[in-house]
Image (cartoon, helix red, strand yellow):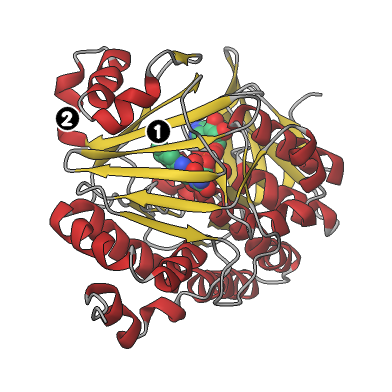
């Protein structure tokens, strides 16, 4: 399939955000072209966990049964272990009564998940072109000329609406002047798959230490995803050998080291970061950003796949309006409405993420919160429900609830 010279909508990036936007827009009858610099299946450093509510979006894309058939692990909740050894345990099904679309979370290798989602966009009618890298963008009176490179050849695609779904270091956000890095937290991640890690159950695990945290989760097919996140300042200790760094980090904590005895690393350690970024706005005239290109905080509560899929679902109707608009003003009006919808959908969760990010950055605070929440299990369930996207953030942002998270129950 050769590259088109014009398209109504050009989406840059075929990760979850691009695939979801493409799927919903193509389903609405819009002419959509999607380009990605990678050739799929491609891997992506990620802890690979999907919240119970992400299943609603997978279902809407006709992908839920495919994800399950691909052997996704089913997760019943999360456990967070603080440096002092106290554990915050939260279940997805709990007494608070809020329920996700499904009672379980899912975990599947991104290599499998992302290709499957991209195929759903194709099935809806999107023209997908792999191994096509966007290099630069020129603003026209209406729309954009987008310069792309495939192999050694340069092409120009003219589009009425440009969508940047191109991840953390989005070239679209940069070219539109919308990119902005977060000053805090500045962390790096090192991710690999292992087999034979002991006692991996049906809960995702987060182990927080004073020098970083590591997530462990079953991702199906007997594999454990190991995602180590450390302050970016530790990059110099890696000496170009991330494998040895991960081994050393795990070896210093006996409760982790014993579980890796006899385990084998199956995939290379892939590094990424720093990852905090937030665009000034998620739109510009005739353009929009979605997924990590628009906003990403930290993988601890990142839930980035859910946000990427949900962002695509939110954007599609406004993008369709923008493309069909009879004037530049009407088009901009639709894109501004997308920005407002994003704020409505994500602001509460962003606040909770920042509070959790604060606790993770200050081990004494984390120790204290874990000591309290290990005894206030109903609050732990609520918090896990918010990070799992099916409990409204306001449930934990109430002053009384925040206070109870910090003050231990009186012993009777
Ligand atoms: C260590 C770590 C652990 C994480 N763990 C989780 C987790 O357990 N659960 C969760 O929900 N989220 C997690 N996240 C977040 C999640 O990975 C992201 O939020 C998610 O991938 C965002 O999807 P996206 O489609 O916006 O971007 P991406 O998945 O990054 O996709 C962007 C696509 O754009 C393409 N692209 C980039 N530049 C160009 C270009 N110039 N031209 C053409 N194509 C281009 C890339 O090839 C890529 O395919 C984690 C993140 C990190 C860093």
Mark 2 / mark 1, whichever is N-terminal: 1
Pick the front one: 131 or 409:
409
Q: Label 1's element?
A: strand
- How far apart are the alpha carbons under marks 2 and 1? 15 Å
Q: Is mark 2 within 8 Å of ligand 1?
A: no
Tell me: 330 left or right of 134.
Answer: right
Q: Position of residue 176 (x, y in %)?
A: 43, 50
* Residue tagged 1: 227
Relative to 2, say whether 4 is above or below.
below
Image coordinates of residue 389 in percent, x first then y, are: 55, 64
Q: What residue is disc 2 on?
A: 234
Q: Write down the quadrant of residue 325 in the picture.
A: bottom right
Residue 329 disc label: none
For disc 2, the neighbor class at 10 Å (few under 14, some 14 to 19, many from 20) is: few
For image coordinates 20% across by 26% down, the residue present is 252
> Residue 101: percent from the left, percent from the top?
70, 63
**Label 1 CB-ligand 1 distance < 8 A:** yes
Label 1 crowd (10 A; few <14 / some 14-19 / many >=20): many
């Amino acid at each position: 399939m050769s590259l088109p010279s014009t398209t109504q909508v050009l989406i840059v990036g075929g990760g979850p955000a691009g695939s979801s936007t493409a799927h919903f827009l193509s389903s609405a009858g819009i002419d959509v072209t999607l380009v990605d610099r990678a050739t799929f299946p491609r891997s992506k450093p990620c802890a690979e966990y999907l919240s119970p509510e992400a299943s609603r979006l997978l279902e809407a894309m006709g992908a839920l049964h495919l994800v399950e058939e691909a052997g996704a692990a089913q997760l019943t909740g999360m456990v967070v272990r603080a440096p002092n050894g106290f554990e915050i345990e939260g279940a997805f099904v709990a007494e608070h009564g809020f329920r996700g679309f499904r009672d379980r979370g899912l975990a599947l290798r991104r290599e499998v998940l992302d290709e499957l989602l991209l195929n759903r966009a194709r099935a809806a009618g999107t023209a997908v072109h792999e191994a096509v890298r966007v290099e630069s963008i020129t603003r026209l009176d209406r729309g954009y000329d987008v310069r792309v490179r495939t192999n050694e050849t340069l092409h120009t695609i003219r589009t009425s609406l440009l969508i940047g779904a191109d991840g953390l270091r989005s070239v679209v956000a940069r070219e539109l002047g919308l990119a902005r890095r977060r000053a805090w937290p500045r962390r790096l991640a090192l991710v690999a798959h292992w087999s034979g890690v002991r006692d991996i159950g049906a809960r995702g695990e987060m182990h927080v230490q004073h020098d970083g945290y590591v997530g462990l989760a079953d991702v199906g097919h007997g594999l454990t995803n190991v995602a180590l996140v450390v302050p970016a300042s530790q990059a110099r200790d890696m000496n170009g050998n991330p494998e040895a760094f991960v081994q050393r980090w795990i070896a210093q904590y006996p409760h982790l080291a014993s579980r890796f005895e006899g385990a084998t690393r199956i995939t290379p350690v892939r590094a990424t970061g720093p990852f905090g970024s937030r665009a000034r706005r998620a739109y510009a005239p005739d353009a929009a950003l979605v997924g990590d290109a628009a906003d990403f905080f930290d993988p601890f509560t990142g839930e980035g796949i859910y946000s990427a899929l949900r962002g695509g679902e939110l954007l599609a109707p406004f993008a369709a309006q923008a493309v069909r608009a009879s004037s530049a003003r009407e088009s901009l009006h639709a894109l501004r409405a997308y920005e407002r919808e994003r704020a409505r959908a994500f602001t509460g969760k962003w606040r909770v993420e920042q509070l959790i990010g604060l606790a993770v950055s200050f081990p004494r605070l984390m120790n204290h919160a874990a000591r309290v929440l290990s005894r206030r299990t109903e609050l732990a369930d609520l918090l896990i429900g918010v990070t799992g996207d099916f409990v409204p953030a306001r449930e934990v942002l109430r002053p009384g609830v925040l206070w109870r998270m910090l003050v231990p129950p009186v012993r009777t």
